[in-house]
Amino acid sequence: MNAHGERHSIRNIRKQFREPRIHFALVCAALGCPPLRSEAYVAPRLEEQLEDQAHAFLLRSPARRRRAVGRVPRRDRTAAAAADGAPRRGWPGARAGRGSRAFERAGGPAKKPAIVYVHGGPPRQMLLGWHYSDYYSNAYALNQYLASRGFLVLSVNYRLGIGYGCEFHRFEPSDREEALAVAWRSSPVSSVSSWTSPVLLIHDDDDRNVRFTETVDLARRLQARGVPYEELVIVDDTHHFLLHANQLRVNRAIAEFLERRLGAVGPPAR
């Protein structure tokens, strides 16, 4: 389009905003796009309008039918201070959990079984809404599903993640020994001696990012300590689940394991 003697496109306009929901608002009206809004976007109601527009699109089934927004679990921003007492900066959150998201279904018991979701990376960021990455949009959907089943899900944006400035993202150890110590403490193997809770191990045997032998090693350590564990091996797939059917299989396994071990408090799964 042309305006004031300059040529503009939807893509170029979107780039001017640091707001992922802009992709639900500025659209080309194609069949697969979010619906056009029947009113103008205005500053006093912009947050409400963007949130509603995102819901209107994300809650569509493949048959293009809308579901009631109220059926989607509420997502709240939460904040958690780091152990080193780092000050909060920007919007809610501190260095340990800046911009964390809590998924919770309205109603039900006051106390719910809780799940802490830690995204991969670490140079990644979980968003308050649907994610632009297919892998993390699946994680968002799974968190929503678990919340709909009665769990409280906390999705944490931890230190070294993106979106909160260089200081939050960067870690510069003082020397090699410190770097090795941090790497060791970050590994599950470093604390396996204190594990007692049941564990579900899921791994693709053609993973090019994380060696499959690491899961084999962890399983042996858990077995040696008598820790109950279950294992699901996805054959001939990679770290990011190239087959959608495998991703669904993993999601079902996770939900079934958590419901069985922690207790399902939601409606029967369908």
Image: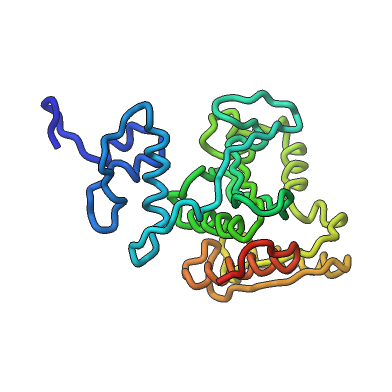
Quarter of the view holding residue 267: bottom right
**Identity of the residue drawn at 23% across and 54% down:** 30
**Identity of the residue drawn at 55% across and 62% down:** 239
Note whether 86 is above or below 127 in the view shown.
above
Tell me residue 142's x, y (percent). Answer: 56, 59
Quarter of the view holding residue 75: top right
* Quadrant where the N terminus is found in the figure: top left
Q: Nearer the viewer, residue 143 or 37?
A: 37
**Identity of the residue drawn at 32% across and 42% down:** 25
| Furthest-bottom residue in this view | 235
Tell me residue 69's x, y (percent). Answer: 45, 52
**Identity of the residue drawn at 82% across and 57% down:** 192
Q: Nearer the viewer, residue 146 or 105?
A: 105
Q: Would residue 40 be visible to someone looking at this image?
A: yes
Left or right: where 124 falls relative to 187: left
Left or right: where 141 falls relative to 66: right
Left or right: where 3 falls relative to 260: left
Note whether 121 is above or below 62 in the view shown.
above
